[in-house]
Image (spheres, rainbow, N blue to C red):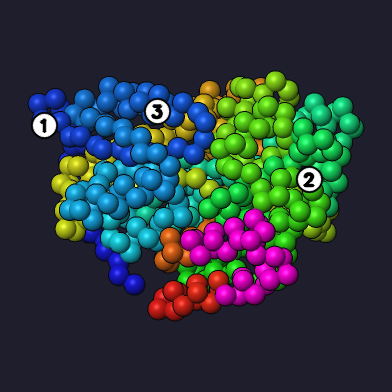
Amino acid sequence: MIRFVRWLGVSALLAGSLAFSTAQETITIDFYYPTAVDAPINAIIQEYADQFMAQNPGIRINPVYTGTYTQTRDTINTEIAGGGKGPDVAVMLTTDLYSFIEEGVIIPLDDYIATLDNPDAFVADFFPALWLNSLDEDGTIWSIPFQRSTPIMFYNADLFAEKGLEVPTNLDELRAVAAALTEPDGSRWGLMIPVQGTFPIWMFQSFAIAHGQNLVSDDPAEVFLNTPEALEAVTALTELGTVDGVMPAGGTAWGDTPSAFVAGQAAMIYHTTGSLTTILNNAPFTVGTAFLPSGPAGADGTGFGAPTGGGNLYIFDTPDNPRSEAQLEAAWKWVQFLASPEVQSDWGTRTGYIAARISAWDIDPLKSRAEEFPQYTVARDQLATAGKEFSSYRAIDIQNIINSTLSQIISGAVPLSEAEAVLANAQAQIDNLLADYR
């Protein structure tokens, strides 16, 4: 493994003034951000940039919307490969962590955190589950939680009340409730899960975790795809559409699922909590939210399982095209601002993403919003049992293998009778990629 760590000497650097006066040359911070939800992200980010610049007149924030997470990663990689610097700061998937570390394009943040008045309090104020994908195996912090989520279940509470149904807490209950809410004429599905297309891994992780074995552990050289739990998980997920007939066979598309739910075409959906505010603002019925009931009933009768998800804040710098220390200091100030309790409280309220700071839930606007709409607390509370989102060495290549394999099975291109062999073949490819890291 090749790893680049730039020794910043931050303590000495930050001992000087971090106040950028207008007499100094203005520092521009290029900030790349994606979105995976239907919310006015562009306007919100620009508001934050304007607030920050008013407080820091010597720093100019240049927000650049870069499309999806995948498009953002491709843009960054293309710019850096072409000799450019890429962004100063970017919101990127937590699952990109090891790829960025190996490529040597991001910096560790421990030295910056150490300069804070109370570094331990800063770290402790983030939900522990959100640090799982922010650290490497040695405990070094490489990114700060920002645009974080878990998938949750949204349900039409009016339909539940009308039919006298209880919210499902395990897979058997999910099947039964979804069957009761599915209309035979096809006008409404009991359930929709967005696993159609090229990225089923996140929703699949809910089923894998709930069946007893996550895809990953704390060791980034371990991936668990060829396991009895993974086979049971992909079988259950696929059969919801084929055998049970309570959701479209092969699942639904990511972007179509929330709109179908709001339109009454689905009684329950799995989707990111980042869609919560948009769904609440547009649904003509009472929206309920719940933990994901993706697995068999355990000792307490529940079968919950969910991964964390979303994006973190990364500061970019490369040895071939290094940034000045002043540029890096300004980037860190912007990261601190976005991760502050005040911004996180506002961000969580306006999008539905989980406010990553624990203290953000005790201040307005999120405090009042959560009191009025307790749906906001479900994803937060689910963090107590949430598993690590997929992350490993060679993450992009391995995710491609997993996504392709799952898509073949879920879509029906590979029959379930051959699923075990297909998973074994994929595991062999993954193990081959990871052999040098073990």
414 vs 138, left or right, is right
Amino acid carrying label 2: it is Val
Q: Is residue 364 above or below residue 239?
A: above
The foreground one among 243 and 320 is 243
294 vs 203, left or right, is right
Could you tell me residue 104's position as x and y percent?
28, 60
Which label belongs to residue 25?
A: 1
Q: Which residue is denoted by mark 2 in the rendering?
A: 246
- Residue 163 is a magenta residue: no
Mark 3 or 2: the one toward you: 2
Closer to the chain start, of discs 3 and 2, is 3
Mark 3 or 1: the one toward you: 3
Residue 212 visible, this orientation: no
Residue 393 visible, this orientation: yes
Question: Alpha-carbon distance for marks 3 and 2?
Answer: 36 Å
329 vs 434, left or right, is left
- Residue 408 is a magenta residue: yes
Q: Are marks 3 and 1 in contact (CB under 8 Å)?
A: no
Magenta extent: 399-425
The quarter of the displayed image where residue 373 is located: top right
SS of the residue at dot 2?
Answer: loop
SS of the residue at dot 1?
Answer: loop
Could you tell me residue 23's position as x and y percent?
9, 26
Q: Is residue 431 above or below residue 71?
A: below
SS of the residue at dot 3?
Answer: helix
Amino acid carrying label 1: it is Glu
The quarter of the displayed image where residue 3 is located: bottom left
Question: Alpha-carbon distance for marks 2 and 1?
Answer: 61 Å
Could you tell me residue 212's position as x and y percent?
70, 64
Could you tell me residue 91's position as x and y percent?
39, 43
Closer to the chain start, of discs 2 and 1, is 1
